[in-house]
Amino acid sequence: MPRLALYTFGVLKSPLADPAPLTREFYDIGGAVYRKISQYPGYLGHAEAADGDRGVLFEADWGAWGKFAVPTWYGKGHTRETTALAATLSLWTDLCPAFDAVYTGLHREALTRRYDWFERTGHPNYVFWWVSDGVIPTWRDGVSRLEHLHDHGSAPHAFTFHHSYTPDGTPARTTVIGPKSDQVR
């Protein structure tokens, strides 16, 4: 049975290594959000670095999730001191469980604060696509799909909550509409 891959990407206002209270707050909330999301029905797993070091994204061993990659529009640093991004890569059983996890509870609370932490880039900040059972999406897959979404809009290859597709490529007929806009303003 196909599974749903979700890649998220945001450019932070300050580097991950910044000791400022806002950066620490983002980390604290992020950890709590991940713990809560991992308990949602329909959640299958997410990319985690083997060494668990949250400050080293580009050099980390991500196992089957592949080498860490970022979209072409990311123009900040790649070192521990200069990296200013947050990205996730996860697997879900379907759109409805992912929607519930994103738009309820702790994650929804964090979304209301996103502009405290993230720059407004004019690029999409998430993308979905279907993968075959047993396939682990890679970071490069996520970047490729996000860039495709930016360049071409939602399609079966790369889509959003608002304009979603079933595994066979037909537009999803679901009551889950998602946000009014899938584009960061």
Image (spheres, rainbow, N blue to C red):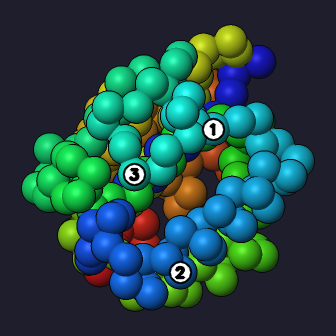
Mark 1 or mark 3: which comes first in sequence? 1
- Identify the residue position indicated by label 2 in the image: 25
Amino acid type of the residue that numbered disc 2 sits on in the rendered structure: Glu
Residue furthest left as drawn: 75
Quadrant in the picture for residue 111: bottom right
- Identify the residue position indicated by label 1 in the image: 46
Amino acid type of the residue that numbered disc 3 sits on in the rendered structure: Gly
Q: Position of residue 115 (x, y in %)?
A: 38, 84
Above or below for 143 versus 95:
above
Dot 2 crowding, Cα within 10 Å, few <14, some 14–19, many 20+: few
At x 23% / y 58%, what residue is drawn?
A: 81
For label 2, the SS is: helix
- Identify the residue position indicated by label 3 in the image: 55
Residue contact between numbered discs 1 and 2, judged by CB atoms under 8 Å: no
Residue 85 visible? The answer is yes
Mark 1 or mark 2: which comes first in sequence? 2
For label 3, the SS is: loop
